[in-house]
Image: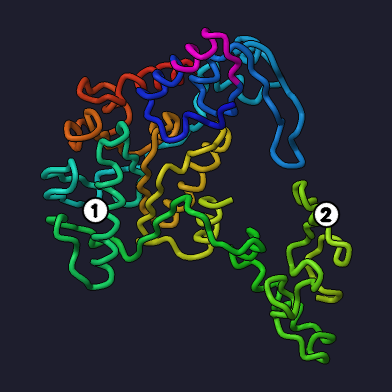
Amino acid sequence: MLDEPSVGLHPSNIEGLRDTIKMLAANGNSVVMVEHEIEIINAADWVIELGPGAGTGGGTVVAQGTPADIRASEDSIIGPFLAGQPAVSRERRPVDGDAVTVEVADLYNLRDVRVSFPERAMTAVAGPSGAGKTALVLESLVPALRASLAGEKIPKHVRRLDAAGIRGLAEIDATPIGQNSRSTPATYSGAFDAIRQAFADTPLARRRRWKPGHFSFNTKAGQCPECEGLGHVDLDVQYLPDIREVCPLCHGSRYREGGESQRLRIASRLRSSQRGILYVFDEPSTGLHPVDIAVLVSVFDRLLDGGATVVVIDHDLDLLAAADHLIDLGPVGGPAGGRVVAEGTPADVAADPRSVTGPYLAHHLTRASRH
């Protein structure tokens, strides 16, 4: 049983993963995977597709069969992508204007590396695992810019930083939002702040002197006393696993009587001005269906329309192919990596013989052009 084994893998590593899975099956094993990677799905013996949507809109087997069956199915959502249809179609933005430039003297396998990220455009940073992507972006560009914005000295290993057009930094990663099990998208994004205030402003709440906290399941004043705002209770049955039941007092509402991670961070940022903000995303395509990749890129475009600059570390070929500017590090990971082997438009990188990502990107672009 494999749960998205392709997560975080460069296209060159996908080949090895595919061969390993085939070897497992050839040795008499049964392999079941949850996966979004097109190349892995196309190599499967049998595909079961759930959908057609997510949440209450899903839960149905919309298609099943061989990859060829799925590609031919009119009901399949992923079929067209298995056949080569690109997930993203967008007009590229100009990259010949101002840029954020960083020079790294010596960090891990980076030696005298100079890279520019065009402002008000989307730059993708690619390369095999260990090629220096994290060292360049998350451990050089990000801390240097953060220090510069705070009026502090930039890290010693960063020789130079030129980011005159940037007034703010937003690093968006997939770390857990917090440890509070009561948190919801509405509480994290701040939407509940206005809702609680609206309830507190009602005549009844004013007469009873209820504050906004009275309408929160995160405070004792507002949460159900039986389940403490969780909406459920766990029953201890001694030697067996606990049984979870809907709270008998609040019936799951989580209140007294009268009272998903990286994308939530993006949503919360969309409320404010984007002009002059540099957004850094670390593998935002993780766990996303091709349809979701298109939505993700549309969100990037909303940020760019507002005057932001977007830098993405990723392996997803749909995302790399949609970038305005692409930087490919390599040629391999470890001591032999750490160099910019190719940069430019996705087509430029695809045509560069020095690029490890190039052949996979070229194949992807060729298939996409047929659609």
Label ID, residue 68: none
Answer above or below: position of 267 versus 3: below
> Residue at left 48%, top 50%?
174
Q: Which residues are magenta?
A: 20-31
State the residue position of label 1.
140
Q: Residues under labels 1 and 2: Cα distance?
A: 49 Å
- Residue 321: percent from left, percent from top: 39, 30
Q: Amino acid at mark 1?
A: Ser
List x then y, in percent, for residue 337: 20, 33
Q: Is 65 on the left-hand or right-hand side of 330? A: right
Q: Is residue 316 above or below residue 270?
A: above
Give the secondary structure at mark 1: helix
- Taking depth in this image into account, of 195 and 300 the one nearest to the observer is 195
Residue at the far front in the pictured view: 239
Name above or below for residue 229 compared with residue 302.
below
Q: Quadrant of the N terminus?
A: top right
Scheme of image coloration: rainbow
What residue does disc 2 label?
A: 245
Residue for point 27% across, 53% down = 139
Image position of 366 (left or right of 79):
left
- Going by the numbered disc 2, the residue's amino acid type is Glu
Q: Residue at x 40, y 21 (%)?
A: 365
- Position of residue 201 in the picture relative to residue 179 (left or right): right
User: Given the current orientation, which residue lies at the most extreme right position?
Assistant: 248
Q: Is residue 343 visible?
A: no
